[in-house]
Image: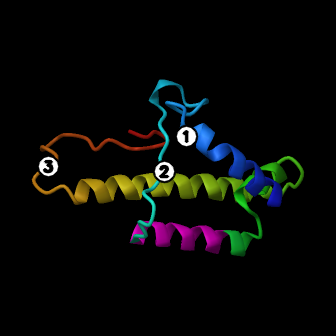
Amino acid sequence: MLSAVAINFFTFNSILKKDKPLLMGDKGKFAVPPRGKIDLRLIGGAAIFGLGWGLSGLCPGPGVICLFTMSEAILWVISLALGQIAFDYALEWHQNKSKPGEGKSQGEEASLPLLHHK
């Protein structure tokens, strides 16, 4: 972990000076939360992350690597992917719910946010 912190310490500001993330193509953008903003979404996300880490005993980075070394890790990776998809659905639902007066017309299908971001 110390090596990750050291690398981040020296590269974070230079990376943010770029227009977009290197591997995201034209659709990518950096999402850095404003300094000092602690809201329910941040606290909830940190709690869920910590709970998952504590229950599984795996941090996400090493957990993906374990996929290639441990047969049990496939369940962990599937759970990770399902959690990300569930978050996308919950966020889309919450954003649509919090926009009053913008209901869907009758017969209009809801857009599923499966593995894509706007």
So how many labels did they put on this image?
3
Q: Nearer the viewer, mark 3 or mark 2?
A: 2
Q: Which residue is mark 3?
A: 102
Give the Cα distance between marks 3 and 1.
35 Å
Q: Is residue 87 magenta?
A: no
**Relative to 105, is 45 on the left or the right?**
right
Q: Name the kind of residue labelled 1 in the image.
A: Leu
Q: Nearer the viewer, mark 3 or mark 1?
A: 1
Q: Name the kind of residue labelled 2 in the image.
A: Val
Residue 16 badge: 1
Does 11 appear above or below 86?
A: above
Give the Cα distance between marks 1 and 2.
9 Å
Boundaries of the magenta span: 40-52
Counting from the top left corner in percent of width and height, residue 5 is at 74, 57
Counting from the top left corner in percent of width and height, residue 70 is at 87, 55
Does 63 appear above or below 11?
A: below
The answer to whether residue 74 of the structure is visible from this angle is: no
Residue 32 badge: 2
Magenta stretch: dominant secondary structure: helix
Give the Cα distance between marks 3 and 2.
28 Å
**Relative to 102, is 73 on the left or the right?**
right
Q: Decide: marks 1, 2 in contact (CB < 8 A)?
A: yes
Q: Name the kind of residue labelled 3 in the image.
A: Glu
- To which quarter of the image does residue 118 belong? top left
- Specify the farthest residue to the right: 69
Q: Is residue 44 magenta?
A: yes
- Specify the farthest residue to the left: 101
Task: Indicate the secondary structure of the residue bearing disc 3.
Answer: loop
